[in-house]
Structures are given as C-alpha cells and as structure tokens.
Image (cartoon, helix red, strand yellow):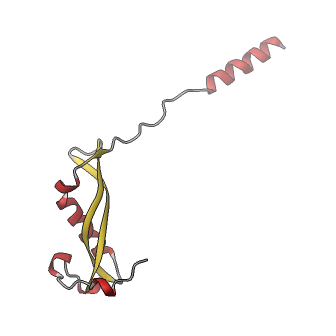
Amino acid sequence: MESVCALALCLLFSLCSATSPPKLPVLTPLNCNETKHQIELAADLINEDREEGFIIRPVRTNSIFEQRVEKVAGASLYYVDFDVKETKCSVLSKKKWKNCDEEVPFHEEVIL
C-alpha cells in the first residue's frame, strides 16, 4: 500500500510545474508635443473606419505610450488618449480631417 501511495505522490509531483508569470508589456511614455504624426494618423484611421456621423479632428493629446513589438523588428504599438472635435463634414465624403475646415460652432455643440 505504501508503494502505491508513493507512486501516486510521485505522479502528482511530476504533473505539477511552476512557470514564470507572463511578462508585462513595457510602456514608455512619450512627450505629447512630439507625437503629432501618430495622433493625426490615429484620427485618419478612425475617420476611415466610421460609416456614419461627422469627421473628427484631433484637438489635444492627453497621453501617449509606446510599446515595442519584439516579434517584428522596428515595430511599435501606440496607446493614445486624445480629445477630438466633430466637423460639419460627413464621413461619407471621405475627406481627410485636414481638408475639412468646417468646424461646428461652440454654441451648437452637444456635450454628452
């Protein structure tokens, strides 16, 4: 009986394994004033994906972080938080936000 218990105990120990916790991504904060290109690109990509509503334009950058992607050489993933304003141009016009000068007057804005 002791040999059966010892065998069962050895079997249980062989099934147990310890692994390191997954590595958390390293996020590097970037200077908001030096990331104009990334914010403009993000606004363009958001506008391209939208199917209804009005074109948005970036107003202010709150924060931006960069995560280097190790699997792809030279690639980065950006986490951005920025404020936007709607223009009067419809997203169906497919204009870039830079080409849409029509801005909604402040007294007509709906703040949610």
| In the image, residue 69 above or below residue 100 | above
**Residue in view at x 21 percent, y 66 percent:** 40
Instruction: Give the quadrant of the C terminus.
Output: bottom left
64 or 14, nearer to the observer = 64
| In the image, residue 76 above or below residue 23 | below
Residue 97 placement, left or right of 52: left
| In the image, residue 41 above or below residue 33 | below
17 or 110, nearer to the observer = 110
Q: Quadrant of residue 105?
A: bottom left
Instruction: Give the quadrant of the N terminus.
Output: top right
**Residue in view at x 26 percent, y 49 percent:** 76
Q: Quadrant of residue 44?
A: bottom left
> Extreme top residue here?
2
What is the x, y in percent for residue 2?
Answer: 81, 12
What is the x, y in percent for residue 94?
Answer: 23, 82
**Residue in view at x 62 percent, y 22 percent:** 14
**Residue in view at x 32 percent, y 74 percent:** 49
